[in-house]
Image: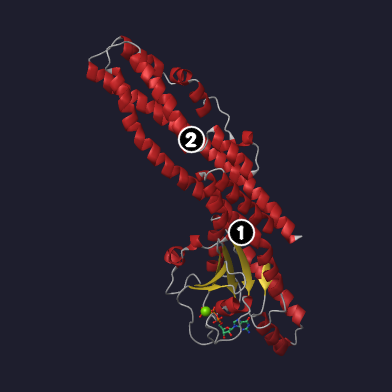
Amino acid sequence: MNKHADEIKLLEETCKKNGTKAMMEKFHACANRWRNTDIKVAVVGQTGVGKSSFVNAIRKIKNPDNPSYAPVSAVKEGTPQIKKYPHPTHKNLIFYDVPGVGTATVPRETYLQRIEVDKYDIFIIITAVRFMENDCWLAKEVEKRNKHYYFVRSKIDADVENERKRVKKRENETVCAIRDSIKESLREQKITPTQVFLLSNFDTDKYDFTDLTIHIKNDLPLWRKEAFVLSMAAFSSEFLEEKKKTLSSRIYWVAAGSALAATLPIPGTGFAADIAIIRGETALYREQLEIDNESLTVISKEVGIPMAELIKDDRVTSAKILNNPLDFCDEIGFSFARWILDFYPLINTLSGLFAWKYCAAALDNILNICIAEAEFRDKRAGAHITRQYENDTDDSRQ
Ligand SMILES: Nc1nc2c(ncn2[C@@H]2O[C@H](COP(=O)(O)OP(=O)(O)OP(=O)(O)O)[C@@H](O)[C@H]2O)c(=O)[nH]1
Ligand SMILES: [Mg+2]
């Protein structure tokens, strides 16, 4: 982790030295976002299964006077609203006490929308008896969204005590029987979870409570990584979307220059002007989107990835257009159209309109090529940073 923090700092310093590059700022912001990304854990279950007790137990909060204590109630429905409870030491780990699906107040039809299912990263689905159809439906919905969930069976202490009184069953016999019965109930619902955690919120040293805590801790870097990758991708597309908007708003006016040249009476002038426009705009798009050689050199150095890996190699690339705009114009049939307009001038206005249209289409084409190259660069750089992060977390876990 520290190694990563040092790298970010170094990156920042070098950026300052080299003149701030928007791309570098972007990576920096992303890395910070990732470090501060909240992991949101929804603790879900029917009324009275022990959700609030679990939220307290996992955060080791025992005193009801503690402002962060989730109210527990033996008699009345206690948690109609969703409430958030940050972990006292892992501040980015936030538990949400969420009502279960299928109650009169929260029917299944509106449930996912009501709890804002997409905002959570992980789900802990609790039952105090067997997992019901609604619990399994929720698990499937969570899985569809590529999110993680754990099944928890609470109140094991009460079952052990009851079975001891009823038929003098030993503790481990009761626990095994519950485990089997839970597995059976999940099989009936066509769910094969890797593990169900059996626990008591009163006795967190017993049964699977510690095991669940270890699982959550070990899976944490994985969730963070996913949150990071997602935020990186979102950030990249946000950034490119903005740039694209600005750059495409120019096309209309720049192409008007082409229209003007098309109305000149000297053959060849219009096309020559277009070539100049195309070359100039390609250079501008490359620079603005930071796919020009200078930007890529800086990025490759700062991210620590060979420059060649950041460059999309295609039949038509922005670099090729820049070096030989004529080839590109031939390729998209622009040269021929312009040649006709230049040598067989129609009435001035008509030539101008055609030139405008062709030139705008060519520029739009080039902008899309540049955007694709920028997306490619972000994907490669993002994957590289993620790999570094993985190595860091592996190091820190050892
Ligand atoms: N024996 C035993 N009782 C538990 C356990 N967990 C919770 N309880 C009890 O179950 C009752 C309900 O607990 P809560 O934590 O309020 O349950 P909840 O799911 O938050 O309930 P609502 O907010 O009403 O949906 C309380 O009396 C708790 O003391 C447990 O592991 N073992
Ligand atoms: Mg509650």
The answer to whether mark 2 is within 8 Å of ligand 2 is no
Task: Check disc 1 and report the residue beneath it.
Answer: 223
- Density class for disc 1 (Cα within 10 Å; few <14, some 14-19, many ≥20) is some
Task: Check disc 2 and report the residue beneath it.
Answer: 287
Residue 97 on image: x %, y %: 52, 73
Could you tell me how many numbered marks the image carries? 2
The three-letter code of the residue at mark 2 reads: Glu
Residue 41 on image: x %, y %: 56, 67
Q: Residue furthest front?
A: 17
Mark 1–mark 2 CB contact (< 8 Å): no
Q: Nearer the viewer, residue 102 or 325?
A: 325
Compared to residue 229, the image places residue 152 above or below, namely below
Identify the residue at horizontal 62%, vertical 72% (top origin).
Answer: 89
Q: Give the spatial CA distance, label 1 vs label 2.
A: 35 Å
Q: Is residue 232 left or right of residue 348?
A: right
Residue 85 on image: x %, y %: 54, 74
Instruction: Tell me the SS state at disc 2.
Output: helix
Q: Earlier in the sequence, mark 1 or mark 2?
A: 1
The three-letter code of the residue at mark 1 reads: Trp
Identify the residue at horizontal 68%, vertical 59% (top origin).
Answer: 2
Residue 379 on image: x %, y %: 57, 42
- Density class for disc 2 (Cα within 10 Å; few <14, some 14-19, many ≥20) is some
The answer to whether mark 1 is within 8 Å of ligand 1 is no
Closest to the camera, between mark 1 and mark 2, is 2
Instruction: Tell me the SS state at disc 1.
Output: helix
Q: Quadrant of the N terminus?
A: bottom right
